[in-house]
Image: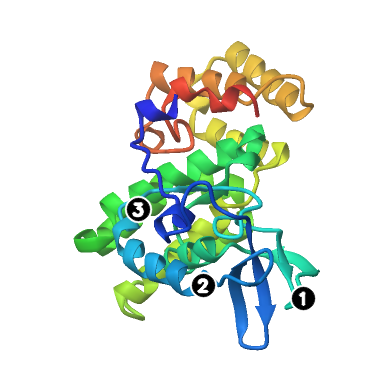
Amino acid sequence: MLSKHFEFRSVCPELEAGLGVPRPAIHLREYENGLRLTDTKGTADHTESMQAFIDQVMPALADLRGYILMAKSPSCGMERIKVHNAEGQVVHRDGRGMFAEALIRTYPLMPVEEEGRLNDDMLRENFIERVFAYDDWMQNVAGGNLSPKALIEFHTRHKFQLLAHSERIYRQLGPMLGDLKSQSLADLADRYIHGFMEAMSQKVSRGSHVNAMQHLMGYLRDAMADADRKVLMEQIEAYHRGEIPLIVPMTLLRMAQRREPVDYLNTQQYLTPYPDELGLRNKV
């Protein structure tokens, strides 16, 4: 389904670093001079060859909009990777794969997830939502497009998404854009997008979705008859109780918007953050 909307690019750091196929198991070892990527016996050190590949490939990943890493991998694991001591014993389990660490450090704004975690409906929906928001930023604000107008329009498009993901950060970012002359635009944009992507990475609770939808209803008050408003409120409450998925009240909101469009809501990505056919809101 995703391949209809994305080009997938496969990268195998271990193969590209010269480990071959098949290859002996490797793991992370912690020495006094830092982490090393070795075979499980500690006799073959692949750190330098892996670093050489990382240095070569990182610039070529700048056009990606998201990255799916492999769980439990000492090269590509995002979190909870075993780290061994010089004798090969596990000393802690909070490491990160060598390639994954470099990727996240080089592209801190890029949405990243592990393939296993994407089996979780909420994490999958959150990841794809972040990917599309990041793409919007890269296409319409970053690079040669940065301007006060582009920054404000981006914030306007994603206002209700921000509200749903983190009301605290939502209330911080709005005032930040109210004073565009106090610092360089590039610095302000950098602070803004780091805050924005931090907010977007947070899971949205049912209560937060209800809050955002009720704000939307305020704009649609004149477009809805009393009976329609009552039905929508019943469905929002049913969603809040966990009886129906998010797609049900969101569809009613979108129908009301199409019936009597409100210009401000036409731009809101919260209503359609990604293509409908992905069906992600059918399960959250």
Q: As drawn, which residue projects farthest toward the top? A: 227
Dividing the image into 4 quarters, which one contains the C terminus?
top right
In this rendering, would 162 be left or right of 66?
right
Mark 2 → mark 3, Cα distance in angstroms: 34 Å
On screen, residue 160 above or below 119: below
* Residue neighbourhood size for the residue with mark 3, other residues' Cα within 10 Å, grouped as few (<14), some (14–19), many (≥20): some
What residue is rendered at 38% in x and 71% in y?
52
Q: Which residue is mark 1?
A: 87
- State which mark lies toward you, 3 or 1: 1
Residue type for callout 3: Trp
What residue is rendered at 27% in x and 51% in y?
140
Residue type for callout 1: Glu
Image quarter of residue 89 = bottom right
Can residue 21 be spotted in the picture? yes
Give the image's coloring scheme.
rainbow
Q: Which residue is mark 2?
A: 47
Mark 1 → mark 2, Cα distance in angstroms: 17 Å
- Expressed as whole percent of the image width and height from the top left, the position of residue 135 reads 35, 47
Mark 3 → mark 1, Cα distance in angstroms: 46 Å
Foreground residue among 202 and 162? 202
* Disc nearer the start of the sequence (2/3): 2
Foreground residue among 203 and 171? 203
